[in-house]
Image: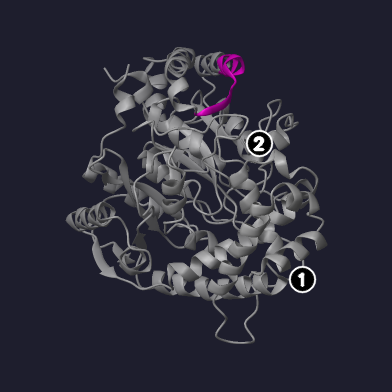
Amino acid sequence: MTPLHRLGAAGIARAYREGTLTPPRLLRHLLDRIERLEPRVHAFVRLDAEAAMEAAEAAAAELARGRDRGPLHGVPVGIKDIIDVAGLPTTCHSRILLDNVATADAAVVARLRGAGAIILGKLATHEFALGGPAFDLPFPPARNPWNTDHHPGGSSSGSGAGLAAGFFPLALGTDTGGSVRNPASQCGIVGLKPTYGLVSRRGVFPLAFTLDHVGPMARSAEDAALLLDAIAGHDARDPGSAPAPPPRRPGGGIAGLRVGFVRHFHETDMPADPEVASALERAAAVLEGEGAVLRDVTLPSLTAFSAINRAILHAEAYAIHAPWLRERPGDYAQLTRASLLTGAFLSADDLLRAQRARGEMIEAVDCALSEVDVLMTASSMDPAARIDDAPAVARTYPRQARTPFNVTGHPALAMMAGLSTGGLPLSVQFVAGYFEEARLLHLAAVYERAAGWPASPMMEEA
Amino acid sequence: MDPSLTEALARSLGLERALAEHRDDVLAAGERAALIRAALPDPRDPAVEPVPPMRAGPRP
């Protein structure tokens, strides 16, 4: 029998409707697991066990009465601690907002409650989704369940770590420069940055308005799809919200799917660790084995994409934090402070150059996607570094190919593509046209079935 | 970026406290901004507009 913490959301939903599991029983199992393993993982900033159990009992009662809210009814979800949950602090993992209690749910949290999901608590993040991993913060940084001496990626670090540790089947993260896809890559799970505007940002503390996305994180593509269905949709109170079409559901295999492999990202622009490069070639072979047709495509360089992302991110983040940086700079962790101050020294010309170059980047990706159905790229260029090796973290952290798709707003998904000789996840990224999340999730589901990568060793612990 | 310029800019932005208490972070930030500036591509067409463009009328 599958241990309960290994069930994904889809499996949980089936078990509830077959009568073999109830929300309170699942939650008790997960809370017991969290109590035992959390001291090694530090996924949580605030576990809301009592409220979660009340919600589980309410969900069980509703399901027993025949009131079925859908596949997430009674399913626990972790929430990154920059996303508001009414009545709980949104600390952004910072001294600056330690006492900041949310008065209302973020739009995505309200949608989850409407779907009957159980809000389990607030999860560790890099400070303000930017500075980390860091040890000079009010809460410890999350650690990687594959090897707790290593970081789990970020900034949605607790989301990735908690999923890989089996603390919950679903989590929300945010992604401004890769922060859903980074922990997905380093923790061997699935993380989707949706099309910009598909998911409301209302009630999410901003890092950079132009680049911020809320995204689903899960241990499978199927579960990520279920979570996306629950949180996506137009929000008139989010100025960036898109009037998106409903998601399509492609079925069948991927025979004939045209995949554009952006090799230059990891071969020349930012040469990847050889194990990452090998994993990407193996992923390409798996896709070809499933009938996909691969060809190389060329996009603008990672250097250009990265500079545009950094200029916009730092300019907007500084604008948000300037009052605190003037009044109480010492209340930030050193990494966060140093990063946030960058925007102070960017000029209007810098920002306009970035915003003007963005148009050309969008056109280049759109042009590539007019000739293929999806793009395939590296995500992280290295496996996760030791969390206590600050120089290694500083060197490897910026080595990634995720930021191009924050710049352009295209949906991008990162997932496991192998294991390093050190036993750490390696990753791949897939990118599709605007609002083609269904295509991405379908490809991810086919790849994950064909590749068959294992879960973290911590998932084997009872 | 010249440290004295970074310091002058920081003071002009009201960042005296950050400069006094975390001078290294301020100077490093100036350097980082300079690196970003140097890596930004220039648009090929001088008439290209920033994204997103201004639009009048009701929001969707």
Secondary structure of the residue carrying numbered label 2: loop
Q: Amino acid at mark 2?
A: Ser
Q: Residue at x 50, y 52 (%)?
A: A194
Q: Amino acid at mark 1?
A: Ala
Asked if residue A207 can be seen in this view, the reply is: no
Picture layout, residue A19 above or below residue A327: above
Q: Is residue A352 left or right of residue A301?
A: right
Which chain does the numbered disc 2 sit on? A
Image location of residue A56, percent across then percent down: 54, 17
Picture layout, residue A200 above or below residue A344: above
**Residue that carries the numbered disc 1 in the rendered image:** B56
Q: Residue at x 68, y 56 (%)?
A: B26
Span colored in magenta: A43-55
Image location of residue A133, percent across then percent down: 51, 40
**Front in this rendered view, residue A11 or A367:** A367
Q: Residue at x 65, y 79 (%)?
A: B49
The image quadrant where one finds the C terminus of chain A is top left
Picture layout, residue A151 above or below residue A292: above
Q: CA distance from mark 1 to mark 2?
A: 39 Å
**Residue that carries the numbered disc 2 in the rendered image:** A94
The image quarter containing residue A100 is top right
**Front in this rendered view, residue A93 or B52:** A93
Q: Is residue A216 left or right of residue A12?
A: right
Graded by Cα atoms within 10 Å as few (under 14), some (14 to 19) or many (20 or more), the crowding at tag 2 reads many
Image location of residue A153, percent across then percent down: 45, 43
Which chain does the numbered disc 1 sit on? B
Residue A216: mark in rendering:
none
